[in-house]
Amino acid sequence: MIRLRDIRFHYGSRYIFDGLNMDIEPGDRIGLLGANGCGKTTLCHIIMGLLTPESGDVEILGKKRMKEHDFADIRGKVGFLFQDSDDQLFCPTVIEDVAFGPLNLGQSADEARRTVSKTLESLKLTGFEERITYKLSGGEKRLVSLSTVLAMQPEFLILDEPTTGLDEKTTHRLIEILSESNLGYMIISHDRDFIKRTVNKLFQMTNGQISPADWTSLEM
């Protein structure tokens, strides 16, 4: 699904990654742990083509991705949930936000409307279609943001701190959604209980490198 080889990336004089390698297989459900500022979100942005490494190879779905058009080809297949929902929701209403991706993938207006209805129903958000996005609660924004990703019918998800701002009920609902899906995903989170209940592989980012983590680290 995703292969990173010898990725080097720096901010100013500080190298965040200096030879990072990672392999993600279809169906993997990965939890990625790491201290604040270690580069977890930067890694997501490199995979999605939002940041360009100084050197190294980004291979997704068997093809090297180097330029913007290479990544545009996979953004419907690898869904990315931003850490901040306000970075993801930019249309006036929920239906417009959720329909945006399907329409850009070539669905007709009627097809996109059906996709929106089905996606919102799956997340128990039926009736949200005409809600004003900026008036939603933090938890509602999070689920609507996830709807915009799932509406594009991705093959893999990358979720950056998905439980931030969620209450216990909404967090439990998100766990159910992920458990019931047939998608692989990578979750970046400081919520160790959430990680423990949603992933089957665990990794740690330390000093710009990714290595397998001990499951006992979730008890710390």
Image (cartoon, helix red, strand yellow):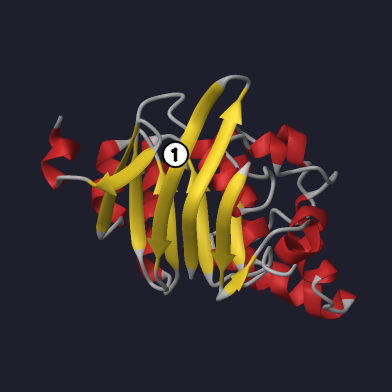
Q: Is residue 81 visible?
A: no
Establish if 207 lies above or below 108.
above
Establish if 98 lies above or below 44.
below
In the rendered image, residue 12, in percent from the top left (x then y), is placed at 63, 20
| Image point (83%, 56%), residue name | 96
Q: Nearer the viewer, residue 15 or 22?
A: 15
Determine crowd level at label 1: few under 14, some 14-19, many 20+ residues with C-alpha closer than 10 A.
Answer: many
Q: Residue 132 is drawn in which quadrant?
A: top right
In the rendered image, residue 97, in percent from the top left (x then y), is placed at 78, 53
- Of all residues, the one furthest to the top in this rendering is 13
In the rendered image, residue 137, in percent from the top left (x then y), is placed at 61, 34
| Image point (60%, 47%), residue name | 55
| Image point (51%, 28%), residue name | 15
The secondary element bearing badge 1 is classed as loop
Q: Residue 62 is drawn in which quadrant?
A: bottom right
Q: Residue 153 is drawn in which quadrant?
A: bottom right
Task: Tell me: 201 left or right of 46.
Answer: left
Residue on which the image places disc 1: 163
Q: Nearer the viewer, residue 43 or 175?
A: 43
Q: Nearer the viewer, residue 86 or 169?
A: 86
Q: Amino acid at mark 1?
A: Thr
Task: Tell me: 38 left or right of 129.
Answer: left
| Image point (71%, 73%), residue name | 115
In the rendered image, residue 99, in percent from the top left (x then y), is placed at 78, 63
Quadrant for the C terminus in the image = top left
Task: Tell me: 176 left or right of 211.
Answer: right
Task: Tell me: 168 left or right of 49.
Answer: left
- Of all residues, the one furthest to the right in this rendering is 109
Q: Tally the marks.
A: 1
Q: Is residue 32 visible?
A: yes
